[in-house]
Image (cartoon, rainbow, N blue to C red):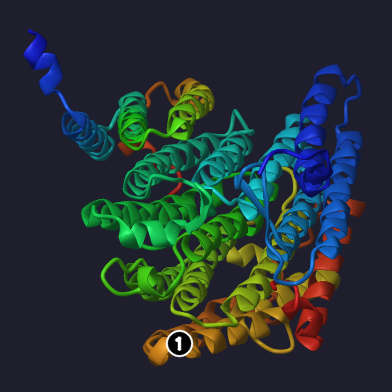
Amino acid sequence: MSFKAADLIYLLPLLVLAVSGMLLVLAEAFYRGKDRAALMGLAVAGAVAAAVSSIVVYRQLAPGEVKPLLSNMLLADRFGYALTALFSVVTALAAMVAPAHQRAHGWVHGEYYGVLLLSAAGMAMLALAGNLVTVFLGIETMSIGVYVLCGLRRRSRRGNEAAMKYFLMGAFATGFLLYGIALIYGAAGTMAFAGIEDGKAFTLAERLVDSPNRGLVVAGILLLVVAFGFKLAAVPFHMWAPDAYEGAPTPVTAFMAAAVKAAATAAAIRVFAYGMGGDILAYGNFGWASPMVVIAAVTITLGNIAAIRQDNIKRVLAYSSISHGGVILVGLAALGLGSGTAQTSLMYYLIAYSLTTMGAFAVVAYVGSRDNERLHIDDWAGLAARHPAAALAMTVCLLSLGGMPPTGGFFAKFYVFKSAMEAHDQQLLWLVIIGVVNSAISIYYYLRIVTAMYFRDSKGAFEPSRSAPLAFVMAVCPLIILEMGVMPGFWLKLGL
Amino acid sequence: MNSVVTHIGYGHFLVLSAILFAIGVVGVLIRRNALIVMMSIELMLNAANIAIITFARMHGDVGGHSFALVVIAVAAAEVAVGLAILVAVFRGRRHIDVDRMTTLKY
């Protein structure tokens, strides 16, 4: 139970991210250059080091092995380190998107890179969380960093407003999360998902089922569902998301949509599947899966319907990401209802979704230039004729978001819905039907952007924000998505 | 005097915490001044803290007490960022009324 120095290696990804984040904040204070591109290099180096160290630790662990660390505060398993590697890679990509956008739109702040990595450290903590304390700390470390990033464009009215809305809603959700944790703690007498007390092994789920205070358990679980609903931007807790996504600088939006949502999912998987999993707790009298299923159905549908009416590309992608959050909730409910493949499917989904979103927002950052972000769909007319590579990258990403083969997005949805079909008694069949119908609807607004790019006449030439790192992100994301769609086998084994 | 003190039990603290939490939630939902919304959120966090401390004492578990301290530190960090955002918003608009922040609407 006690701390051993040999356990430090399991903390390596987390420490690398946190320490390099702090060093970057310091470096910004002493930096004398005008351009902050050198800091971008350091941030990428730190994130890549974290990704490499998580892969090293990942290979040290056997599939299915779960190793408790620091008195059950963290759980080291392959699932957690695969997610940590994903978050580190997405963080590196988000750092690479930034310099061109910062130069073009006049918000050259080096703090971006440091806060980005600190926020990623919170995400790593969430991926490895084994205790409600670490879940709370991880969510706060991540969110506080992202509030700062969201408001980095201090003089922009839109940026400020986005930061304000995101902060107030996020902090409100934190209140629910904390009160939920308090009630669960009251019912169970522990915050660890599993552990040993007085020589007897226990799990949080068992304690909750045996608890004499059923009211506390039900109220606590409902509060946690609401809190995660806010963090995942699930309907009806999604009001902040489109505004925050639109107003934040595009690299930050990319980070929020790709990494923050994936990290919130990771935390939800840890809390609901690891902490409150088991046959009795998910459905039946206490049932966290029942409210979650309803929220999932509403989220997929309303996210899609709202996206159809949008003309602003960032808002389209925001609503599309809300709808994707609904699919994630389907996977979570399937996980709770005893589907054996749900965890691997969710892992695959998160990888495909994060890289796709990152690629799409990278193209959005590329198309905008000084004093004109070109976010309206009409600004994208005829893009394929002038910038064929960017249009192609965007098309691949949009097809993947819409779930069309041969992209990763297709298999992501396919596997999540397949695992939902395997749930206990086929209870989720109706949800799968809703999900598939909505995938078909979503093709409409994704293809609307594609047709604008390929089949409409452009309004005139413009100079996009060019930079080598940005071009790298725009090339590498679609390539990985296509690779995932052609050969999904490797990616499906990561979640075990 | 002494009997009053001994009659205050865990239940009273839990009821107090529930009432504070409810006041906080209602405050966030009905007040339009961003500063007061933030104060209401703080009230929610502190209500949760009271509940956590009460339960920690009920279960005789030190972990809960230290978690409450962690929560205080985190809440302070959050408020620091929140106030900074608030100041930036106020500089641009000369008000912090959440209902009048409608630049981001289609």
Q: Name the residue at 41% across, 21% down.
A: B94
> From where the camera sits, is residue A382 visible?
no
Judge by depth and name the residue closer to the eye, B75 or B81: B75
Which corner quadrant holds the C terminus of chain A? bottom right
Closest to the observer, A171 or A361: A171
Let me know if residue A299 appears in the view.
yes
User: Taking A127 as reference, is B77 above or below it?
Assistant: above
Q: Nearer the viewer, residue A267 or A259?
A: A267
Which chain does the residue under circle 1 lie in?
A
> In which quarter of the view is residue B96 placed?
top left
Q: Position of residue A250 (x, y in %)?
A: 66, 50
Crowding at dot 1, Cα within 10 Å, few <14 / some 14-19 / many 20+, comes out as: many
Residue A36 image offset from top left, x and y in percent: 86, 32
- Residue at 39% in and 91% down: A425
Q: Is residue B45 above or below residue A65?
A: above
Q: Position of residue A64 (x, y in %)?
A: 70, 71
Write down the residue under mark 1: A432
- In the depicted structure, whether residue A372 falls above or below residue A362: above
As drawn, is A73 to the left or to the right of A27? left
The quarter in which the N terminus of chain A is drawn is top right
Image coordinates of residue A436 in percent, x first then y, are: 49, 88
